[in-house]
């Protein structure tokens, strides 16, 4: 397999429609914000220094994406940490290395921003999802907790 099956870059406002369409492969029945709301959110997101929404594309199609948020930090000598969220690969492009490429790119960006660690969480309970993140170089070393305003439906329901 080609070691770089996709071209990766930071998303810009003109990418919003294609990015929102790709997110439907993450949560198929998720509510989609209007173009104006999405544009406003994207502009606010750009205020987080070092943070980015990365998109991977091939043949003019968005096939993978993830978001990196660089969080300022007063511990670890003031080194920030990175949070990766919204990891998604288009259903037609899974198991081709696209997800690993986008995670590698985000991790490199976090290291370039001075982060001392990069974290991500998944709501999946599927063993293949855990294997994917482990194969991408992440370790399952912490216990995550969350509190949501609106409960999440159990996977598969």
Image (cartoon, helix red, strand yellow):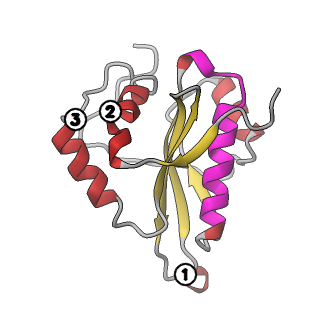
| Kind of element beneath mark 1 | loop
The circle drawn on residue 33 is: 3
Mark positioned earlier in the residue sequence (3 or 1): 3
Q: Nearer the viewer, mark 3 or mark 1?
A: 3
Callout 3 touching callout 1 (CB < 8 Å): no
Of badges 3 and 2, the one in the foreground is: 2
Residue at 30% across, 43% down: 148
Q: CA distance from mark 3 to mark 1?
A: 36 Å
Q: Along the horizontal axis of the image, is 55 left or right of 30? A: right
Q: Residue at x 44, y 47 (%)?
A: 11
Instruction: Quadrant for residue 21, please give it.
Output: top left
Mark 1 to mark 2 CA distance (whole Å): 38 Å
Decide which of 14, 29 is in the foreground and name it: 14
Residue 91 x, y percent position in the rendering: 55, 18
Q: Nearer the viewer, residue 75 or 35?
A: 35
Q: Quadrant of the N terminus?
A: top right
Residue 8 at what x, y percent from top left?
A: 60, 44
Q: Label 2 belongs to which residue?
A: 17
110 falls in the magenta region: yes
The answer for how far apart the CA atoms under marks 3 and 2 are is 10 Å
The magenta segment: 92-111
Q: Which residue is mark 1?
A: 75
Q: Along the horizontal axis of the image, is 4 left or right of 35? A: right
Mark 3 or mark 2, which has the lower sequence index?
Answer: 2
Question: Does residue 80 lie above or below 14 as drawn?
Answer: below
| 42 and 82: which is toward the camera | 42
Which quadrant would the C terminus be assigned to in this image? top left
Q: Would you say 112 lies left or right of 151 here?
A: right
Q: Say which element carries label 3.
A: loop
Q: Residue at x 57, y 27 (%)?
A: 125
Q: Mark 3 near mark 2, Cβ–Cβ under 8 Å? A: no
Crowding at mark 2 (Cα within 10 Å: few <14, some 14-19, many 20+)? few
């Amino acid at each position: 397999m080609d070691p770089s099956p996709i071209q990766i870059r930071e998303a810009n406002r003109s990418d919003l429609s294609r990015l929102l369409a790709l997110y439907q492969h993450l949560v198929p029945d998720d509510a989609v914000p209007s173009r104006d709301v999405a544009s406003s959110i994207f502009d606010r997101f750009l205020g987080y220094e070092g943070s980015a929404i990365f998109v991977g594309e091939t043949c003019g199609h968005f096939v993978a994406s993830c978001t990196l948020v660089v969080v300022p930090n007063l511990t670890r000598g003031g080194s920030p940490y990175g949070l990766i969220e919204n990891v998604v690969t288009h259903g037609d492009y899974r198991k081709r290395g696209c997800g690993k490429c986008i995670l590698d790119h985000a991790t490199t960006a976090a290291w370039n921003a001075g982060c001392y660690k990069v974290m991500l969480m998944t709501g999946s309970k599927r063993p293949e999802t855990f294997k994917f993140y482990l194969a991408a170089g992440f370790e399952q070393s912490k216990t995550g907790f969350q509190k949501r305003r609106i409960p999440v439906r159990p996977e598969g329901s």
